[in-house]
Amino acid sequence: MYCPKCRAEFREGFSHCADCGADLVNGQPPESEDALRYVEMVEVFSTYNPGDIAFIKSVLDGEAIHYYFQGENTNMLVATGAYARLLVQEDQVERAREILQELELLEK
Ligand SMILES: [Zn+2]
């Protein structure tokens, strides 16, 4: 799966681009000079709780983890019952999971 606008690649299970919200397309992104800059983001956690989001952000900032919260807008969370998804740079997923487990936000 990949985003036709950003050419970012996502694993199966994603339906929208984490960066621009565009619908993902099946297959591999076309080769381009941008390809080298692309970093895969992997979902490691999701929550309905805005308090969790603020907490996780402060911890991940301290650990220099590159992350992105998709759908973190608190008003949206409350109004629609949607949840926020924590996406982490692929090569830091393991470390991020360890941190979340230490915080007892993720089960081991
Ligand atoms: Zn995109």
Image (spheres, rainbow, N blue to C red):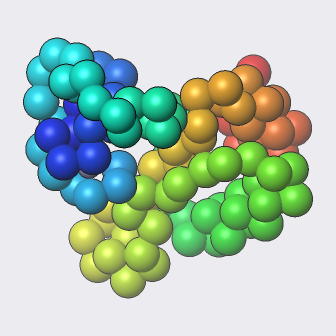
Q: Is residue 73 above or below residue 14?
A: below
Does residue 41 appear in this view?
no
Does residue 12 appear in this view?
yes
Q: Residue at x 70, y 32 (%)?
A: 92
Residue 93 sits in quarter: top right
Q: Is residue 68 above or below residue 44?
A: below
Q: Position of residue 53 (x, y in %)?
A: 62, 64
Q: Position of residue 32 (x, y in %)?
A: 28, 30
Question: Is 86 or 26 nearer to us in this picture?
Answer: 26
Question: Is 22 or 99 nearer to us in this picture?
Answer: 22
Is residue 31 shown left or right of residue 100?
A: left
Residue 10 sits in quarter: top left
* Image quarter hosting the N terminus: top left
Q: Position of residue 25 (x, y in %)?
A: 12, 30
* Image quarter hosting the C terminus: top right
Tally of numbered tags:
0
Q: Residue at x 48, y 38 (%)?
A: 37
Is residue 4 shown left or right of residue 2?
A: left
Q: Residue at x 35, y 34 (%)?
A: 33
Q: Is residue 86 above or below residue 58?
A: above
Q: Position of residue 82 (x, y in %)?
A: 32, 61
Q: Residue at x 55, y 64 (%)?
A: 49
Is residue 11 shown left or right of residue 108?
A: left
Query: Can you name the residue that lies furthest to the top here?
Result: 27
Query: Can you name the residue that lies furthest to the front here?
Result: 33
Question: Is 7 or 48 nearer to us in this picture?
Answer: 7
Q: Is residue 63 above or below residue 41?
A: below
